[in-house]
Image: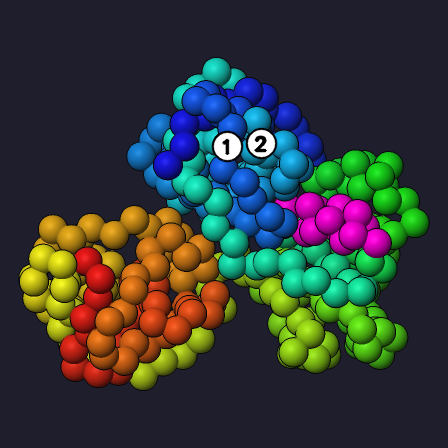
Amino acid sequence: MQQTILDRVDRVADGVVSLVLRGTTGPLAPWEPGAHIDLALPNWLTRQYSLCGDPADRESYRVAVRHEPLSRGGSEYVHLFLRPGRNLTVSLPRNNFPLVPAPEYLFLAGGIGITPILPMLRAAVASGAGARLVYVGRSIAAMPFAAELRASHPDRVDIVATETRDRPDFAALAAALSPRALVYCCGPGSMLAAAEAVFPSDRLHTERFRSAGRAFAPNRAFDVVCVRSGQSVQVAPDETLLDALTHAGQPVPSGCREGVCGSCELTVLDGEPEHRDDIGAPPGRMFACVSRALSSRLVVDL
């Protein structure tokens, strides 16, 4: 974990503020485009936000927070109560959405989904790659960093405000896609579904802020053995692995509880996990908030 102080709160769009967090004990941990951090809020909630500043700036992190009408308490607290000067703890950056080297890119962003895309576009341009961004939102006033993008990349960015323009034709964009280009998309579920329907899956990279809501077989009970302590914990059908471990005194750091942030990653030493996350767990790993077991027993590194 890292200690920071909230240096600035800036309104960057209707209902969106950016937070600039400055390190208090020296340089902050390095990060690459696509990374996010866990931000521990003073109301005991932890939320995940994509880093949207400059990776070369080791003195501060920048994130952006949209005020969600159905907030679970995180965005509401940030908008109504968080003020500069507050000490805040953040995690080391994690990256489930890395920018893979390529000669060309097409970036697609919807609303607050611009946050991980913003440093990606800068990095792509700096590398000499061909890069284009299609940025979609309800109105210019509601689209964070629209003015910044227009000023810095006027010839590369198409800003589509749907109150005055039709939504972009993803099928036409896919038909015109260079065979050398990768596509990066972040936004609401409807945008991701539209992108997944037309772009080649081996060249499309997506990040979700909410679970895709896929269907799985009914939950079954299973046992998990914590190898370091030797403790065996039963996970009932109506509870998550994360909750079962917490109740048994084996707490695991967590954030979204939807399988999209990666903060509750566990190393699996034996047994077969049932992956229900939207990240794509690497071999030998699983995310305890949503994933379960196909085998009757799992052994984890706890």
Queried whether the magenta region covers residue 219, the answer comes back as no
Residue in the picture at 57% in, 59% down: 97
- Asked if residue 219 shows in the view, the reply is no
Residue range highlighted in magenta: 115-128
Q: Are marks 1 and 2 in contact (CB under 8 Å)?
A: yes
> In this figure, which residue is indicated by the disc labeled 1?
28
Up-down: is 28 above or below 272?
above
Q: Quadrant of residue 294?
A: bottom left
Queried whether the magenta region covers residue 122, the answer comes back as yes
Percent position (x, y) of residue 142?
71, 41
Image-based side of 240 in relation to 4, left or right: left
Q: How far separated are the C-alphas under marks 1 and 2?
A: 5 Å
The quadrant of the picture occupied by the C terminus is bottom left
For the residue carrying disc 2, how many other residues have a C-alpha within 10 Å: few (<14), some (14-19), or many (20+)?
some
Residue in the picture at 19% in, 74% down: 298
- Numbered badge on residue 58: 2
Percent position (x, y) of residue 271?
23, 79
Q: Quadrant of residue 284?
A: bottom left
